[in-house]
Image: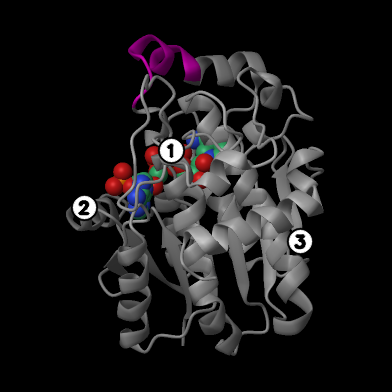
Amino acid sequence: TKSVCIVTGASSGLGLATTKALVDSGEWHVVMACRDFLKAEKAAKSVGLPKGSYTVMHLDLASFESVRQFVKNFRSTGMPLDVLVCNAAVYFPTAKEPTFSAEGFELSVATNHLGHFLLARLLLDDLEKSESSSKRLIIVGSITGNTNTLAGNVPPKANLGDLRGLSGGLNGVTTSPMIDGGAFDGAKAYKDSKVCNMLTMQEFHRRYHEKTNIIFSSLYPGCIATTGLFRSHIPLFRALFPPFQKYITKGFVSEEESGKRLAQVVRDPSLNKSGVYWSWNNDSSSFENVLSEEASDPEKARKLWEISEKLVGLA
Ligand code: NDP
């Protein structure tokens, strides 16, 4: 029988390429957890996934109700859960004003961090029950949240501050929509959310690795300059970004290559160390990367965990 992996945001970009790589291995059944059912079905067909090799299930990370419903629906299928990949994300680099999730939280942190935090917490039990000797929970990170890198130093830089905006509920009315309590900045909100993703993975590792044997990991798949993530950027940026990454920074990776990388983190026996943030060299060999001071601060990770628990209704 095949192993089962849930991939959030499998309808495009990295999520779709990862789904393709896993299905092509012949050993995996992928649950594509997507907000747009028709788009996901079309995407699956467009990359030639055979019928029966995947299941599309509805998940809107911008609604806690939807996250809870997804977990119920998944459980009702009776499938085991061997690996969960938290991949979906939104990015609003040119937004002048914040937008909000169903429960009223700034949309990029709500989708990229809070929705995944709730999903991962709820599915931890299911992962623990998996009979696989290599069960994994993966949260996709990014270089942009890492201020110890060149890319992470392009302003506005990620900075969670003392998390006062997050504690206040990121609602843009009684509190700032930004985690650090500052003025709204869409690009920074995205970077902050990726720092949350990397901190969350490490906190999961500290709290649950020994107890559950689950392998927790994060990664930077490389700059996939062609995905939908940049859809709301200005046209000039969208035209120049891929060649810039290809020829100037040389950090460009194709969607196919990035999907192979994430699929390695899902199934490669040698990438079985928990608590690691994986990256790849230009020759596509993987290595354990070092996170920035903020993205590896255990005190901040603990505080983020506790506040997030309250916001998603788990505490
Ligand atoms: P895409 O925009 O191509 O894919 C994002 C996916 O997330 C889409 O399937 C989208 O669904 C889904 N999504 C967005 N909002 C929700 C929601 N509310 N509920 C459920 N699904 C949702 O971007 P990428 O493939 O580039 O991004 C994937 C991951 O890779 C992200 O975590 C990103 O931070 C990370 N990453 C990307 C890099 C890059 O260079 N592109 C670099 C480093 C990290 P829909 O199709 O319906 O819009």
Q: Nearer the viewer, mark 2 or mark 1?
A: 1
Whether 230 is among the magenta residues is: no
Image disc number at residue 42: 2
Q: Provide the residue designation for mark 1.
A: 174
Q: Can residue 264 be seen from the camera position used here?
A: no
In this picture, residue 205 sits left or right of residue 40: right
Q: Residue at x 47, y 41 (%)?
A: 170
- Does the residue at mark 2 contact the one at mark 1 (Cβ under 8 Å)? no
**Callout 1–callout 3 Cβ contact below 8 Å:** no
> Identity of the amino acid at label 1?
Thr
- Place of residue 165 in the rendered image (x, y in percent of width and height, measured from the top left): 55, 39
Give the residues in magenta. 232-241
Give the residue displayed 72% in from the left and 62% down from the top.
Answer: 203
Q: CA distance from mark 1 to mark 3?
A: 36 Å
Residue that appears at 36% across and 71% down: 68
Local secondary structure at mark 1: loop
Residue where numbered disc 3 is placed: 275
